[in-house]
Amino acid sequence: MSEKKRWSKSTIIFGGTAIWGLLLVGCVMVDRTVIMPPNIAGATYVGTKKCDECHKDQTGHFEGATHSRLALKDPKVGDIGCEACHGPGSVHSKSGGSKGTIVNPNTSPETCFTCHLDKRGEFNLPHAHPVLAGKMGCNDCHNPHKGHVVARSGAELESPNETCTKCHTAQKGPFLFKHNAMTEGCTACHNPHGTVNQKMLISRDANLCLKCHLEHPAVAGDGTIMAGGQDHRTRLQSGTCWIAGCHEDVHGSNASKAMRY
Ligand code: HEC
Ligand code: HEC
Ligand code: HEC
Ligand code: HEC
Ligand code: HEC
Ligand code: HEC
Ligand code: HEC
């Protein structure tokens, strides 16, 4: 997937010792991506150990967090993982934590964009969560301090779908007639960062559904479009699979196995 490709790019950018060089220089062009770590006037890096003196809640589980693997190092103070997102912390630490001395990415995604530049573009698409408007933050869906930064199934406390259903309760269920697509996660059909399609759908037409439901025709090349054991050729001419009268209850239904109202 193209997303994976973007990853290997940023991994190269932040790999090994290169990262310290980046932080030191402040702004460098690598692979046509500009990286600018948060800057705080007059402040220098003090290291994660320093933060631990006052912020056990955040440092306590940080070792297992995705971003701790970045292993940003300053030769003088060692690990500076916290400051990669919060900016250099000397002024903040000396003042005992006074206001306005440290970056808090809670309401502004700018810190995250310094490294995840492509995400600014996704949030600028016509249908996106209102992160750029400041109505929600990356941290509504990503936990920067603990565990995997993207909720996964398995040992994670929060399942991927719970990340979404804590706000979108209507999609939570339980439904009498489940749609098993939901076990693949909301991202089987939506890109929560943003898309060009209504409702942040990853595809605006029947392809959204046919990627899982297209079946082999009984006779190869007979022109049928088989889904759910039925030929959908004429049906698909009336619109998307989820228009009124068809499968409008795509998340699950209490009325019909075929996901209709
Ligand atoms: C001497 C104690 C102390 C040290 C050391 C310290 N902090 Fe703080 N920090 C505080 C206090 C006190 C607050 C204010 C807490 C509050 O308002 O509830 C705070 C607040 C914060 C906030 C929230 C700021 C806001 O505007 O909402 C962040 C982020 C933060 N610290 C990060 C760090 C990081 C990163 C480090 C290490 C580089 C660090 N702190 C080191 C005491 C400290
Ligand atoms: C990947 C970026 C990232 C890293 C790395 C990171 N933080 Fe944060 N931090 C955030 C975001 C986003 C918020 C705002 C949301 C929240 O409160 O969880 C935040 C909030 C905070 C707050 C304020 C909490 C509050 O209740 O207001 C403190 C204190 C803090 N971080 C300390 C730390 C410390 C200490 C470390 C290192 C162990 C660290 N952070 C590493 C992104 C990060
Ligand atoms: C200093 C650069 C940097 C900053 C700042 C930063 N990240 Fe990251 N982030 C990375 C790197 C590098 C990885 C890949 C880590 C890995 O795979 O081990 C990553 C991984 C992630 C992932 C997981 C990707 C995956 O496929 O599993 C998410 C989600 C993420 N970051 C969100 C955020 C958010 C939200 C913020 C702001 C609060 C943020 N990041 C700030 C560099 C950064
Ligand atoms: C509405 C929830 C939501 C918000 C808000 C959100 N994300 Fe995500 N993000 C997700 C989900 C869910 C995934 C996992 C996608 C997948 O596995 O298919 C993800 C994946 C990622 C990834 C790794 C995969 C990729 O697409 O590169 C990064 C990096 C990331 N998010 C960064 C961010 C940043 C930065 C912000 C804020 C500017 C942000 N996200 C805001 C839900 C969200
Ligand atoms: C913190 C609350 C919150 C979380 C968490 C959240 N959303 Fe949203 N979602 C919103 C808000 C706010 C809107 C914008 C509603 C509007 O613009 O009227 C929205 C809009 C949407 C829409 C478009 C609805 C429409 O009518 O156009 C979809 C689809 C959606 N979210 C899916 C998701 C998915 C998938 C996740 C999990 C990856 C998620 N949301 C997580 C708050 C949240
Ligand atoms: C099988 C594909 C699929 C999956 C999986 C899926 N959705 Fe949707 N979702 C859709 C379609 C299609 C629409 C558009 C429905 C419409 O426009 O009538 C939609 C619309 C929405 C809306 C807008 C609600 C409205 O009334 O217009 C929200 C919010 C939403 N989805 C959230 C979620 C959440 C949260 C999850 C995961 C728990 C999820 N979706 C999983 C296909 C899916
Ligand atoms: C990620 C894969 C996936 C996607 C995408 C998906 N589905 Fe499904 N769907 C399933 C699975 C798995 C089942 C349960 C097994 C089955 O009946 O084929 C199912 C069952 C159904 C059923 C019930 C069939 C029956 O007779 O029990 C309907 C109707 C349905 N899906 C409609 C849709 C529509 C409409 C869309 C597009 C909005 C869609 N699906 C997208 C995986 C998916």
Image (tube, rainbow, N blue to C red):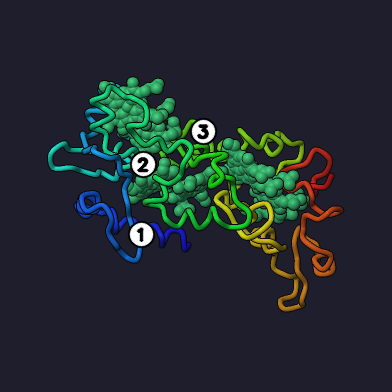
**Mark 2: which secondary structure?**
helix
User: In the displayed structure, would residue 223 be above or below residue 213?
Assistant: below
Q: Position of residue 218 (x, y in %)?
A: 75, 70
User: Image check: 107 left or right of 70?
Assistant: right
Quadrant placement of the C terminus: top right
| Residue 134 lies in quadrant | top right
Residue position for label 3: 158
Extreme-bottom residue of the structure: 221
Q: How many marks?
A: 3
Give the Cα separation between the discs numbered 3 and 2: 15 Å
* Residue 165 placement: quadrant: top right
- Give above or below for 74 relative to 32: above
The residue most toward the front is 41
User: Which of 110 and 73 lies nearest the eye of the viewer?
Assistant: 110
Residue assigned mark 2: 66
Q: Is residue 20 above or below residue 68?
A: below
Q: Residue at x 41, y 62 (%)?
A: 5
Which structural element holds mark 1?
A: helix
Residue 47 visible from this viewpoint:
yes
Q: Mark 1 Cα within 10 Å, few/some/many (few <14, many 20+)?
A: few
Does the numbered disc 2 mark a residue whose Cβ is under 8 Å from ligand 3?
A: yes
Looking at numbered disc 1 in the image, what kind of residue is underneath it? Answer: Ser
Q: Is residue 223 left or right of residue 80?
A: right
Q: Secondary structure at mark 3?
A: loop
The reply to whether dot 1 and dot 2 touch (C-beta < 8 Å) is: no
Q: Position of residue 26 (x, y in %)?
A: 26, 52
Q: Amino acid at mark 2?
A: Thr
- Residue at x 71%, y 63% (from the top left corner): 205
Pointer 1 residue:
8
Q: Amino acid at mark 3?
A: Glu
Q: CA distance from mark 1 to mark 3?
A: 27 Å
What x and y, as percent, mark residue 221? 72, 78
